[in-house]
Image: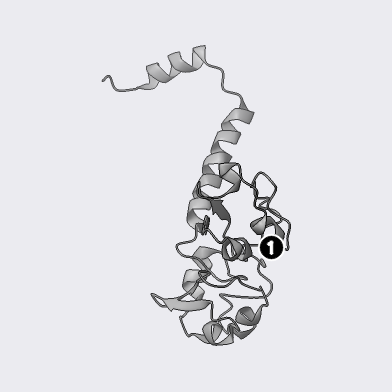
Amino acid sequence: MQARNEQYYEAYLSHKQISRRRLFRTLFNSVDKGQKEYNARLAHRPPFAAEEHLFLVACTGCGDCTQACPHNLIQIQQKKAVLELDYMSCSLCGKCAESCSTNALNIAFKRDTGLRPSVSNECLVKQNQLCTMCQDQCSQQAISSNLMVNNELCNGCGECKISCFLSAIQLV
């Protein structure tokens, strides 16, 4: 393959017009993607958690949040708080955030676990049968009749997952 030199790029640009707007859009889109990867959760975090890169620095794994959680949904794994919504949903009561002395969890942060339901093919609705359990149990009314999730309304509480008797909903 021939090395791309200055002549190559001059010839390319003489045939292709790249506007300033397109150049900046490309630059900003690449920054946004990098930022999303930077803030991607490495594990399920409790509600009111700081952005992941801040959370990892601030959380000491002290366990105050685990003791404060009235439903025992928070565990310490690898010296960090992790939310386990396998048997009960989160009430988003904020007691974990109130107990956190390092501010890894703080009432000022988003009242959201960041988790969203993913419905498998085991779901009765996907098999053209009638079932409204997850929709009925969602206090946020974030799940539509065609199982689309409104991410703005959903707070990741896990009520939909717990209510599904077929275990067709996972939180991701």
Rendering coords of residue 38 (x, y %): 49, 55
Image: 11 above or below 95? above
Q: Is 83 in front, or is 60? A: 83
Q: Quadrant of residue 101?
A: bottom right
Q: Is 120 in front, or is 65? A: 120
100 lies left or right of 139:
left
Q: Is 136 in front, or is 170? A: 136
34 lies left or right of 93:
left
Rendering coords of residue 151 (x, y %): 66, 52
Image: 19 above or below 78? above
Q: Residue at the far left: name it.
A: 1
109 lies left or right of 4:
right
The amino acid type found where label 1 is placed reads Gln
How many other residues sit within 10 Å of disc 1, few (<14), some (14-19) or many (≥20)? some
Q: Which residue has dot 1 on it?
A: 137
Rendering coords of residue 84 (x, y %): 50, 71
Q: Quadrant of residue 46?
A: bottom right
